[in-house]
Image (cartoon, grey):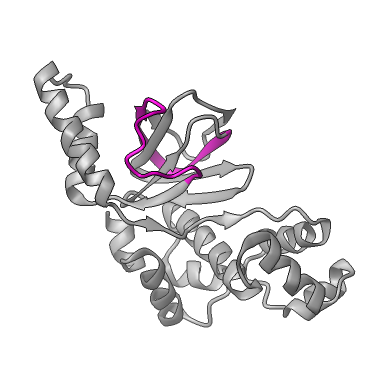
Amino acid sequence: MPLAHRQRIDWHDHASHQLIHPHRGVLRISTPIGDWVVPPHRGVWIPAGVAHAHEAYGPTEMRALVFDPPVNPLRLDRPTVLAITPLLREVMLALTGDDEPTATQRANLERVLLDQLREVEALPLCLPAPSDPRLRDVAAILETDPADGRTLAELGAAVGASERTLSRLFRAETGMSFPQWRTQLRLHRALILLAGGRSVTSTAAACGYSGPSAFIQAFKHAFGTTPHAYVRS
């Protein structure tokens, strides 16, 4: 399914599991528990019944495979980002392409697909959505400007909560420390900016990194590739 830049598919759910993969471009997938930003070398597993919405960044081509509820090779009950291997990518393309495979070819491809999914690596790339109003206010500040470098104590003063309270709430509601959550937010924004054509240097500055080198190091640690390689993919 081709999607234009900033095109959105509104909230919906499915009776079946879905594996969604952007063959090109970037997808931001929102769920009630958080957001995932998915580049071409990643996919996201969405279990049956989970409400979600999509938004494309850059010209995007979304591929999706559906699985009957009893078929869950990943054994996952919540949305999860996955590493898409080159073989898995090619199998997905063959199953979702314009050239319809024969019944025998489809059965063979589906066997390979399930074998690959049983071995695939799940990645901790969710940006959890906090529910406490004070955390939501902090999140709104940083989503507006990811480069905002204020400490948690300074942000707490802006939203009317102590640093200790906010720190405790971040861990309780997101499973992350505040620095981990802010890093995830910045990396998500970086994927979106790169997909929109921003340079690595400009993206690093917009996301609050001290310079391109620090940004490249953080990006590679999170996504397994450099921003330059990601842009060329």
Please name the residue shown 42% across and 51% down the image: 81
Is-magenta flag for residue 84? no
Instruction: Give coordinates of residue 205: x percent, y percent.
Output: 54, 73
Residue 102 seen:
no
| Residue 15 horizontal/vertical position (percent) | 49, 23
The quarter of the image holding the N terminus is top left
Q: In the image, is 41 to the left or to the right of 210?
A: left
Q: Is residue 5 left or right of residue 207?
A: left
Which of the pair 69/143 is nearer the observer? 69
Residue 205 visible in image: yes
Q: Position of residue 146 (x, y in %)?
A: 62, 66
- Residue 150 position in % (x across, y down): 72, 78
Total count of labels:
0
Residue sitting at 16 percent across and 21 percent down? 99
228 to 149, vertically: above or below: above
> Along the line of sight, which residue is nearer the eye, 219 or 15?
15
Q: Left of 206 or right of it: where is 56?
A: left
Looking at the rendering, which quadrant does residue 13 occupy?
top right
Q: Is residue 212 above or below residue 133?
A: below
Q: Nearer the viewer, residue 152 or 128?
A: 128
Boundaries of the magenta span: 51-79
Quarter of the view holding residue 66 = top left
Nearer to us in this view, 194 or 26? 26
Asked if residue 190 is positioned above or below residue 100 in the image, the reply reads below
Residue sitting at x 50%, y 64%: 187
Magenta highlight on residue 73: yes
Does 127 sit above or below residue 80? Answer: below
Quadrant for the C terminus in the image = bottom left
Q: Residue at x 38, y 29 (%)?
A: 70
